[in-house]
Each structure stands twice: as C-alpha cells, then as structure tokens.
Image (cartoon, rainbow, N blue to C red):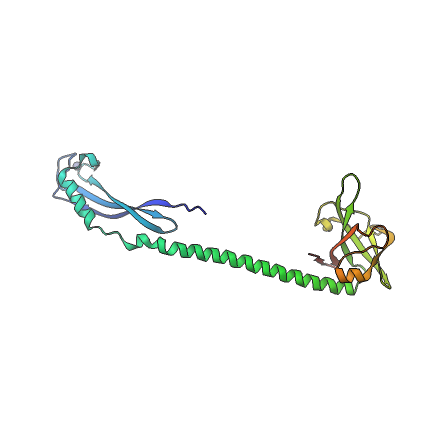
Amino acid sequence: MIFFYQIRTLTHQVTPCPDLTCPLCGSRGGVEIGIYQKYAWMLMPMWPEHKFGMAACTRCDHSIPNLKWTDELEQRYYQLKEETRTPLSLWRGILINPLLLLTFAGLIGGLVFLLAGKNKHQQAEDKILLAKYIAAPKPGDLYRTMVYITGPNPGFNYTYFRYAGISGDTLFVEKLKKEVSTYGDWDKLDTTRPDAFDSKKIPLKYTVFEKNQDFMVFGDDTMRFFFKGIDRGEESISKN
Ligand SMILES: [Zn+2]
C-alpha cells in the first residue's frame, strides 16, 4: 500500500522587533520575524519537520531575504526559534492514523464477511425453496434451462421448460421454442404467447430432479439440459 502525504507549513508566531534595523530601507521599528515549521500531513498532522524563519519590514513593505540578514537579525531569529516549541499535536497522526487505517480495514473486512455470510444464507434458502417448488409443481411453473449446443460452435443457450404434468417417476415438460445466448437473459424470453412452447412433451426423471435439483432426460438428450432455477408467478429462484 502506498501512502501519500503533504508537507504543510505551520506559522508559530510573527514577532515584531522594533529595536532592529531593516537592512533594506535602513529604518527601525518595522522589522518582524516569523517562525514557521514544516510538517507532514495526511488527514491530520503526522510528524514535524524543520523550523525556519522569515523576516519582513512593515516600513518598506518588503520581505528581507536571508542573504541580507544582519547579524543582529540572525541572532534574534535563532533566539526566537529556540523559544518556539514544537507542539505535540504535530505528532498526532503517528498515533492516530494507524488506528484509523486499522479501523478502516476492519470495517471493510467485516462488510465482506457479512456479505459473504448473507450470500451463503441466501443460497441455502434458495435451495430449500427450490426443493419445495420441485416437490409440489404447479401448472405454469417455468424451469430455467441451460441447453448445450453441439455442432461447429459448441456452447450454451438459455431457455425455459414449462411444467406439463407428472406420471409416476416421469415429469413432463414442454420446451420454449426460443432460446437466448446470454446467461441471465431469461427475462427477455416471451413465454406468454399461445404457441411459444413446443407441443412435444419431454420426459424427465422426477426422482433425480427432486434429489439433485437437475434434469435427467430420458433418451438421447440426457446430457443436454441443465436446470438453473424456477420462475413461478412473479417469483424467480436461481439455482446456485
Ligand atoms: Zn524596511
């Protein structure tokens, strides 16, 4: 992880020194010395760096460059600098920021954990619901189906099986004529048109469907269809 921090400047104090002579205009009474300090800042002051001074004259309204400082000005500067203590608050971030980072990391971790738990919980609930719907099928139940496509470009299409009755261990379904090639696009399929479904009834092994929540088609198509969920009325439950 990379941390970015800024260097900021704290103004400790600006002290008037009326007894000093300005090296620029030669008059007295206008010289001021400011003591400043650099510090690292990241959300808050992290640690102090060096102190430095700037001098100015209010008589001629110029700042006095270091090179022009007289001995007495320089001496006064060192004295003022010496008297200026680095406030402890400039060290604040060293202590607090790691705590902030830890708190932040903790929050993210907790959130991920909660979401994962919720997701798992949801999956378990869906499985129970699917079992319930499979155990008691209703006319109008639509089974989300993944179809394996053979040929030169093998892949999967997505469509619906519609519940069409049970006889012994055989569950009959009718296949929707249309298919889509994008996973999750079941909503785009129109299942309401009268001739939307194939009239041919496909026999599935009901005990396998109940036990494994998957299709097993009698005959040649055994490995072609995969169960992906149930739509009943407004509800739709996905198989995970
Ligand atoms: Zn001056």
Give the total of numbered labels.
0
Image quarter for ligand 1 equals top left
Residue at (88%, 52%) from the top-left corner? 200
- In the image, residue 74 lies at what x, y percent? 16, 41
- In the image, residue 25 lies at what x, y percent? 15, 34
State whether residue 87 is above or below residue 133: above
The quarter holding residue 134 reads bottom right
- In the image, residue 69 lies at what x, y percent? 17, 37
Q: Relative to the observer, which residue lies in front, 39 or 155?
A: 155
Image quarter hosting the C terminus: bottom right
- In the image, residue 113 lies at what x, y percent? 55, 59
The quarter holding residue 218 reads bottom right
Q: Is residue 210 left or right of residue 54?
A: right
The quarter holding residue 52 reads top left
Q: Is residue 178 left or right of residue 42?
A: right
Q: Is residue 160 left or right of residue 22?
A: right
Q: Relative to the observer, which residue lies in front, 221 or 239?
A: 221
Residue at (71%, 49%) from the top-left corner? 185
Residue at (13%, 35%) from the top-left corner? 26
Q: Relative to the observer, which residue lies in front, 219 or 129?
A: 219
